[in-house]
Amino acid sequence: MTNKINLLSIATIAVVISVFSTGCSRTDKDRQSSQTEKIAEVDYYTCTMHPSVKDSDPNAKCPICAMNLTPVYKKTTPTQLNEKGNHNGHQHENEVDYFTCTMHPSVKDSDPDAKCPICAMDLTPVYKNNSRSEAEQAIPEAKTVNISLYRQQLIGVQLDTVKNRRMDRTIRTIGLVAYDETRIAVINLKFSGWLEKLYIDHVGQFVKKGRPLFSIYSPDLVATQEELMQVLPRSSKTNHNSDPLLESLYQTARERLLLWGLSEAQVGEIIQDRKPRLRLTYYSPFTGYVIEKNALLGEYAKAGMNLYKIADLSRIWVFADIYESELSFIKTGQQARITSPYNSEISLTGKVDYVYPTIDNKTRTAKVRLVFSNPDLHLKPEMYANVEIAVKSDHQLMIPETAVLNTGKRHIVFVAHGNGRFEPREIKTGRKAERYYTILEGLQAGELIVKSGNFLIDAEAHVQGVIQTMNN
């Protein structure tokens, strides 16, 4: 009896060992077959930076940039995908609809190994979307392009939020220092005569108001003084004649001397001395630097001749060239700053004084006049200066300039709706400030848009026919 029990126990243990070994062998076979199937799905390995590099070794490096190679999987036909989905008990989320060419979206084929008949490139699969949330269903499928998260990472997709920003910017250009034309005086003669003495004899000399410039002998001036002497009041205590005719002649002669450039003090001295002056000294009516001199000692100067030109350099003009694309930002009264490219210590703050109404045909720029105080005379006419004009504005709806695709006829952005879905949307842009566009129509604050990688998304949108639907 004992022997029978022992034999039965040994048989039971043998059966258990046999079943366990059979299960282990099946598990190892399944694991090996899964790994073999996974490896078999890889077609080759390539470099994302150099697609011409192809290798079958998964551990190989790119011979050009030494980067790790990326696996490229074999294509699967729609029938095979459907069979896999049915075998797993559910339909594949991204079912292949057809294969097309990225360069020629009109080419469509169901064969994954087919080539483009136009450029002979490999065809790219276009997937169907079967799983969509209720929020996503609000946007028609034909108006969105679908890109997986893995592909977004490969092409470097970056998102940004549409929001209100200040449209502040700084316009930088080169300016040319010039004289303030409202602070230039010309010294000329209203009568003819000979220059007998020059007190200012060279260009660049500083002249204060009231300083003598030259002495002149003029027969016309002497004759007018003699006429004044003949009609002077008999008493030196009064400036009026009792005879109306004499008073009229007196006032006429006196007024003529004043109109010829003599000061009230000079005419008063002539009347007080009751003696004509043969030589008259002319005094500067202005403070500044002599920038032009035509007076020569002993020269006969005719009436109307310009003898000196004097400029006040305590305030100067700076002419800046502004491109017509930036001209709309410039307004009179805006703050401006200039610095010297040769001396970093020179920095002056002024304002925009005038915007000239014409455009240069060759440079396509407009002249803008800036006004600056120049108390230390650091800036001199004909010097160059760096100009910065600060432009400030209120908050406006803005997006990065990299987010906008300019097709020539319209501006397009890609709005992100989540789950790899992007909607191409036409917008209307306004001004461009620094690296941003203002938005007039098409977007609302808070929406997510693509600011980097949108060119590749645009190519995918053409492949999936989204742009063609948008055009229709």
Image (cartoon, rainbow, N blue to C red):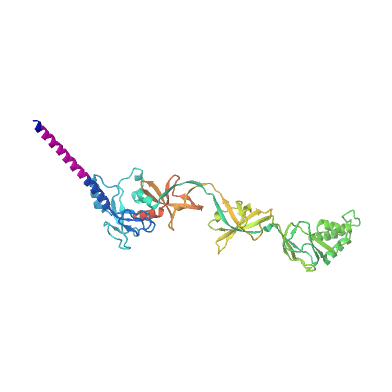
Q: Is residue 253 left or right of residue 130?
A: right
Q: How many marks?
A: 0
Q: Please say whether residue 367 is one of the residues in the magenta stretch.
A: no
Decide whether residue 11 is among the magenta residues: yes
Quadrant in which the N terminus appears = top left
Q: Is residue 302 left or right of residue 319?
A: right
Q: Residue furthest right?
A: 234
Q: Nearer the viewer, residue 32 or 154?
A: 32
Q: Position of residue 339 (x, y in %)?
A: 61, 54
Residue placed most toward the observer, 241 or 469: 469
What residue is at 24 percent from the left and 48 percent from the top? 32
User: Can you give x and y, in whole percent of width and height, for residue 279 in the image?
Assistant: 84, 64
In which quadrant is the C terminus drawn?
Answer: bottom left
Residue 177 rendering spot, x and y as whole percentages: 64, 58
Q: Which quadrant of the view contains residue 21? A: top left
Q: Residue at x 59, y 56 (%)?
A: 386
The main secondary structure of the magenta stretch is helix
Query: Taking 197 as reference, is 140 left or right?
Result: left
Q: Can residue 472 be seen here?
A: no
Q: Position of residue 411 (x, y in %)?
A: 44, 54
Q: Which residues are magenta?
A: 5-27
172 displayed left or right of 61:
right
Nearer to us in this view, 467 or 401:
401
- Asked whether residue 218 appears in the rendered view, the answer is yes
Front-most of residues 386 and 100: 386
- Residue closest to the far front: 3
